[in-house]
Amino acid sequence: MRSISWRDLRRSGSQVLRDLAAGEELMVTSNGEPIGVLRMHPPPTERQRFVSPEQYAAGMGDSPALTVDQQQAWLEDSRTDDESRDLWASA
């Protein structure tokens, strides 16, 4: 695995992206110390625009669904009098 300094990464970002697209992995260093590894994330095999109810339910796991009353209470709690206050007045 090739190493690249943080400075070189900022300076030659386009080349780094081309190297990653070609399958190369890069160790990023700062002051000679490794701070991370860069590798190309594989693209999805197929773009999915919509999620079926079954997929949504499976992704939610054990998370309980909110009732309509709970959703309404959350919306009311999230609205505060501070939103109507002029934020620039205290600056």
Image (cartoon, rainbow, N blue to C red):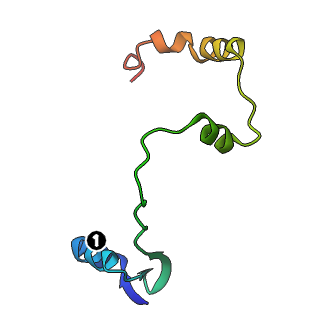
Quarter occupied by residue 17: bottom left
Q: Secondary structure at mark 1?
A: helix
Above-or-below relation of 62 to 19: above
Position of residue 39 relative to residue 24, above or below, is above
Q: Position of residue 73 (x, y in %)?
A: 68, 13
Residue at the location (36% across, 81% down)? 5
Q: Is residue 44 above or below residue 6?
A: above
Kind of residue indicated by mark 1: Arg
- Nearer to us in this view, 81 or 76: 76
Frontmost residue, 81 versus 50? 50
Nearer to the camera, 27 or 49: 49
In the picture, residue 6 is in which quadrant? bottom left
Among all residues in the image, which is located at the extreme bottom? Answer: 1
Residue 14 horizontal/vertical position (percent): 22, 71
Q: What residue sits right under mark 1 in the picture?
A: 10
Q: How many marks overall?
A: 1
| Residue 71 pos. (x, y %) | 65, 17
33 or 72: nearer the viewer:
72
The answer to which quarter of the image holds residue 26 is bottom left
The residue positioned 68% from the left and 13% from the top of the image is 68
Residue at 59% over, 18% down = 78
Q: Quadrant of the N terminus?
A: bottom left
Q: Is residue 32 above or below residue 20?
A: below
Residue in the picture at 31% in, 74% down: 21
Disc 1 crowd rating (10 Å Cα; few below 14, some 14-19, many 20+) is few
